[in-house]
Amino acid sequence: MHEPLSRRAFLGATGAAVAGSALARPSAAVAAPAVHIPPPARPVAISSNNSLRPVTRAVELMLQGADTLDAAVEGVKIQELDPADDSVGYGGLPNEAGVVQLDASCMHGPSKRAGAVGALEGIKTPSEVAKLVLRYTNHILLVGEGAKRFALSYGFKEEDLLTPESRQKWLAWRANRGREDDWLDVPQGEAMVARPTGTINLNAVNAKGEISSVTTTSGLAWKIPGRVGDSPIVGAGQYCDNTVGAAGSTGRGESNIMVCGGFLTVEHMRRGMSPTDACLETLRRVVAMTPPRLLDGQGRPTFGLTFYAVNRNGEYGAASIFPGRYAVHDGREAAAKDCAHLYERR
Ligand code: GLY
């Protein structure tokens, strides 16, 4: 008589049976093609326009021998902790209810691991929490209350993330958003004509060719509570494959999620494209996937989106829908550079 199988034993047995069949063997068609790219002579870090300090810190740390993910996270933490940067962390612009909800994700190329948090409240540095998810759990994405409890268990302090300035901007938006609500317009109030999206994506490679990526954001300002964008979505907000490179984005997250842009950009590089061309190609896919309500009369998107990429060789590049800038440190010096772009102006 057969003993009843436990679930674990059953999975083990079926796994072994399937593994024995030809179907289970990865075929050349599904396996990622191998690439052989030599490492760069010096570490490189590429990031968004607000990140000259983060790329500088990341390269400094890599030159001292730090792991690429530790270096990348220490870099973006500078902006997360800076109350003057209203796109990430402390001082980030809140959701429509006036609550700051932060998203972040990261990947570590050498260990092939990822971690992320979404809609995290009360913790200034979501990139660090994402790194803890990567390092200490069997999961990839924690959200909301669970993500906060996870952070608190590691000794993070719960704090009010609104600064006086970000609260003022939110109050001005709430007062001026429409004529039909019960909030009176603020005299001389700031007219909120645009909805800011700010984010940092930072990709780093060291002289051994080890690569990591991190993306952190307070997301779309005035978003519906609970909305998470592309930043905590591994494969969209950032992606890293240690044999190829890393890529990530800033800008309208929903449009990036539709094309899995971080992953797609790395796959373009795998097929031999330069980082800049890979970013441009991903943007063309974004435009192709954009519904008519988000296109202007000339078929151009009505939103902004930028991709940043570095390959294992230390070549880097960035591209945006409309002209923009990015920050890079090539191991010698930090610089702000122009992105390649699809369209001249909005
Ligand atoms: N890319 C940031 C966001 O859409 O939340």
Image (cartoon, helix red, strand yellow):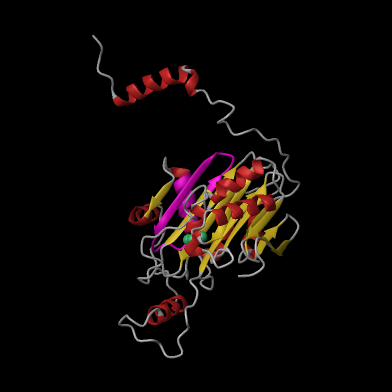
Q: Which quarter of the image is occupied by the N terminus?
A: top left
At 46% from the left and 50% from the top, the residue drawn is: 116
**Front position in the image: 138 or 27:** 27
Quadrant showing the C terminus: bottom right
Between 12 and 191, the one lying in front of the other is 191
**Residue shown at 54% from the left, 46% from the top:** 107
Q: Position of residue 41 (x, y in %)?
A: 76, 46
Q: Is residue 108 magenta?
A: yes
Residue at x 30%, y 82% (from the top left corner): 182
In percent of width and height, residue 119 lies at 40, 59
Residue 281 in view here: yes
As drawn, is 173 to the left or to the right of 66?
Answer: left
Residue furthest bottom as drawn:
187
12 is higher (above) or lower (below) than 162: above
Q: Quadrant of residue 312?
A: top right
Instruction: Count how many numbered circles sit on residues in the image.
Output: 0
The single residue placed furthest to the front in the displayed view is 297
Q: Is residue 71 visible?
A: no
Q: Which residues are magenta?
A: 107-134
Q: In the figure, residue 202 lies in which quadrant?
A: bottom right
Q: Percent from the top left, x then y, of residue 152?
A: 37, 56
From this view, report whether residue 27 is shown above or below residue 65: above
Q: Where is residue 43 shown, x and y percent of the image?
A: 70, 50
Residue 152 in magenta stretch = no
